[in-house]
Amino acid sequence: MGQIVIKTDVCVVGAGHAGCEAALACARMGLETVIFTVSADSIALMPCNPNIGGSSKGHLVREVDALGGEMGKNIDHTFIQSKMLNLSKGPAVHSLRAQADKAEYSRRMRMILENQDHLTIKQAEVCELLTKEAGEEGRARGVERYVTGVRIFTGAVYEAKAVILCTGTYLNARCLCGEAITQTGPNGLQAATHLTDSLKKLGIGMRRFKTGTPARMDKRSIDFSRMQEQKGDEKVVPFSFSTNPEDVQIAQDSCWLTYTNEKTHEIIRANLDRSPIYAGIIEGTGPRYCPSIEDKVVKFAEKDRHQVFIEPEGRFTNEMYVGGMSSSLPEDVQLEMYRTVPGLEHCKIVRNAYAIEYDCIDARQLYPTLEFKKIAGLFSAGQFNGSSGYEEAAAQGILAGINAGRKCQGKDPVMIDRSEGYLGVLVDDLVTKDNREPYRMMTSRAEYRLLLRQDNADLRLREKGFESGLISEGQIRHLEEKRRMIREEVERLQKTVIGASSVNQGFLEKNNSALLKTGTTLAELMCRPELSYEKLAEIDPDRKRLPQEVLEQVEIEIKYQGYIERQQRQVEQYKKMEKKKIPESIDYDDVKSLRLEARQKLKEFRPVSVGQASRISGVSPADISVLLVYLEHEGRRQ
């Protein structure tokens, strides 16, 4: 029998949160796409926490939605509790977080993929990446090979113009629970054991990372009366800009808060020698910002308790997720440890906590487009790139999908820089920094976070989604109308002057606000911390009825105008450096006066702009000055 050869445009390896977004993006751009998964039942699986969003991660979900992705829509259809975090702080750090019905989230995403034109799901393990050598022209740009497709374990070959690797935590995965070690992927699913060797043969540098997950408890064995109930928001805000807010006002499930105590910590300390992390069995580096309970007890020894969130895994299951207590301790220690926590004294474990080790890459091998520098047509996204989290994966997935699709179409890639989105910060940090542990997005990583709020993701990124064919003309018209309403209402408030009438003075007195001595604009009044757009309705009878999404932008734009303008000036300076592109064919050995370390780093990274070059460790401001002089001289010479 002959070998099966199937021709397609794009192959996506892995059907987790990155793979789903990448495959949907390519298929929606009209490209024939095949998505491979070791199990069709694991599409968009949530092997760890049963939620989407959270601090800074909610920003990423909104950005995925603004670009035309599916994650926001999917959680809007399948959430069981929703909460806006950080409301006591400024709008830059407000973040939406929703508990998901895990099974329903996965089921609905699979249905979306199954019914998407140009998209085929294939249950198979990809074991080899197929490439061909680059010619002289490619080598001049630093390209060594071109991707031509993949081979699956059965021997069938899929020829493709682009391949996107979204292998998550499956590559050479092994799960550890004390002395019990199993060579499986998350949730006991089959690991992918063959692809790593193929990648290494192609010269791709690999790393070994780890993550973990806590136990799942039987709800009936938990005493909730000993815990603090955590309810969702009364007024739910949807993730997707396309979701009707009325459609998400549903009955919500509760979560519960409890705490570890000194007894818990004593049991952990007494059994550290049985933890694979501390016994030296685990080689991989774990996530700093999502540590195991063993790590918390060791690294924060001064703390006498740690928060534990008990969260439902879905509406139709009794499994409860024990957030904050991931572990790789043996089963007997886990049970003893968990039963010291108030409310868990008689708990029954449905699934043990475990750590998982897996292969991933050093993402500095990628361009900001998420294409490999040395292998043209090969892209990667998600935890395979050394990041952690469903939201970080989905965000990389849609960017990799868009750029793989555009490469197949012969179009320029889409770039999102640090001033345009959290996605830009995420990708830039991955491809320029030496991340020795799983990378997690945080608001503190975004230097322009007052401009990169979750509420304005559509205003920032919708056009890029439209340019890529993922956003409809109707959605763009809606965006333009929203912009017009915001602009006109801001201008009206800035021009509407009110005087010191008895009505106005009475209003100000009632709201504990300073009385007027002369006329002032409504916009100036809005800047007072005790006043808001909503409160000013009492002395602003001429205002029109406007959508809530418009009112939110009007309030932020006026109240934070000075801060926003200052940050915009910072962005202008940043953009100047980003616009100074570095030719792909540059020979850094020709750039005299560059320090040896800088020359080595620039040759290794091959940054696309002077701005990116300036963020590479080992490249100093003096080196950037030398590079700028060289580029200017070359530009004049040519």
Image (cartoon, rainbow, N blue to C red):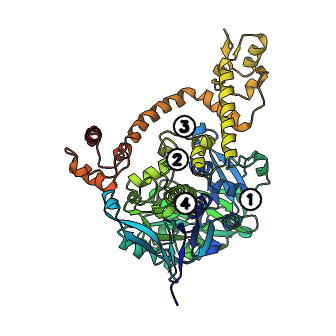
Residue 495: image location, x then y, percent: 66, 18
Question: Residue 340 or 254: which is nearer the viewer?
Answer: 254
Are the residues flagged by discs 2 and 3 in contact, CB closer than 8 Å? no
What amino acid type is highlighted by mark number 1? Ser
Would residue 542 be visible to someone looking at this image? yes
Are the residues flagged by discs 1 and 2 in contact, CB closer than 8 Å? no
From the image, state whether disc 4 or disc 1 is nearer to you: 1
Q: Residues within 10 Å of mark 1 (few under 14, many from 20)?
A: few
Residue at (36%, 62%) from the top-left corner?
374
- In the displayed structure, would residue 494 be above or below residue 551? above
- In the displayed structure, would residue 441 be above or below residue 455? below
Pointer 4: what residue?
262
Are the residues flagged by discs 2 and 4 in contact, CB closer than 8 Å? no
- Quadrant of the rendering where the C terminus is positioned: top left
Residue 344: image location, x then y, percent: 66, 65
Are the residues flagged by discs 3 and 1 in contact, CB closer than 8 Å? no
Between the residue at mark 2 and the residue at mark 3, the CA separation in whole angstroms equals 10 Å
Between the residue at mark 2 and the residue at mark 4, the CA separation in whole angstroms equals 39 Å
From the image, state whether disc 3 or disc 4 is nearer to you: 3
Dot 3 or dot 1: first in sequence order is 1
What amino acid type is highlighted by mark number 4? Glu
Between the residue at mark 3 and the residue at mark 4, the CA separation in whole angstroms equals 43 Å
Pointer 2: what residue?
422
Disc 2 is placed on an element classified as: helix
Dot 1 or dot 2: first in sequence order is 1
Q: Residues within 10 Å of mark 3 (few under 14, many from 20)?
A: many
